[in-house]
Amino acid sequence: MHLLEMKQLWVEQMELAGVPLSSGLEVFSDLVGRYNQKRRYYHNLNHIAHLLKLWQENKTALQDPLAVFLAIWFHDAVYRPGSLSNEQKSAELVKKLFAHTTMSGCLIDKVQTLVMATRLHYGEDRDSQIFIDFDLAILGEPSSVYRRYVFGVFKESSMPNAIFAPLRRRWLLKMLDRPRLFNAMPGQEIYEVGARENLKMELHRGGSYGDYGIPENARA
């Protein structure tokens, strides 16, 4: 999905939210600037585009597509690797950027709740569960796509392999220990199988995470 298409979707959703075009475009420009930061190798506009594509394909399954759309845009708006306050600050940003617009407080609250659900990747209602499935969908993509995701997360961390690897291993074991990774998204079973294969592959692979940036067919 190109930026122009993402902008058009944004304009359409701002109209549904009752936000004037000028105010909506100011928020859009702010968010694009955040996701275009050079230090972002995974949590960038490509990640948002991936989630927006899933949103387009599955929005009829959502009770409040507008709230989920906005949560997609805001959930990683504030991102500092290793920080425990990313989700909280991203949720606060929703109110900050829309405070002086005509967006309803009820909608802002919904978006903030959805953003906070990504902290533990746990949702209590169907919309938050589907949204979290969107966010985790990268885990179930083909292995070549999954490898690029892993390398992006590694580069974002700015950690040497010796520090990153054990932390990542702990996260992999935690994810694999879940009874289910996906809970509500249409087609979740396909993602579930692919995600577990990818996580197990990474867990048992060994070697340096720097190698994930080398195409599989180019490795010795």
Image (cartoon, rainbow, N blue to C red):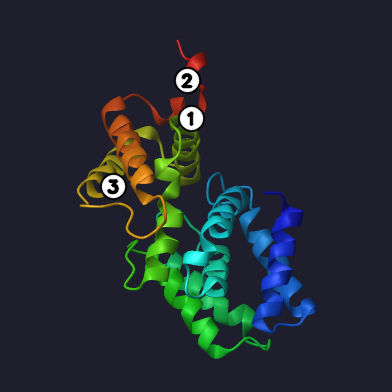
Dot placed on the residue nearer the N-terminal end, 2 or 1: 1
**Amino acid type, residue under disc 2 in the picture:** Glu
On the image, the x and y values in percent for residue 186 come to 42, 55
Say above or below: 152 vs 94. Answer: above
Dot placed on the residue nearer the N-terminal end, 2 or 3: 3
Which residue is pictured at 37% across the width and 43% down the height? 190
Q: Which residue lies under the disc numbered 2? A: 216
List the single residue furthest toward the front.
60
Q: CA distance from mark 2 to mark 3?
A: 23 Å
Say above or below: 55 vs 206. Answer: below
Q: Which SS class for mark 1?
A: helix
Q: Are marks 2 and 1 in contact (CB under 8 Å)?
A: yes
The disc label shown at residue 51, or none: none
Q: Which residue lies under the disc numbered 1? A: 144
In front of the other: 161 or 97: 97
Q: Which SS class for mark 3?
A: helix
The disc label shown at residue 171, or none: 3
How dense is the environment of label 3, judged by Cα within 10 Å: few (below 14), some, or many (20 and up)?
Answer: some
List the single residue furthest toward the right.
22
Say above or below: 90 vs 143. Answer: below
**Amino acid type, residue under disc 1 in the picture:** Ser
In front of the other: 152 or 181: 181
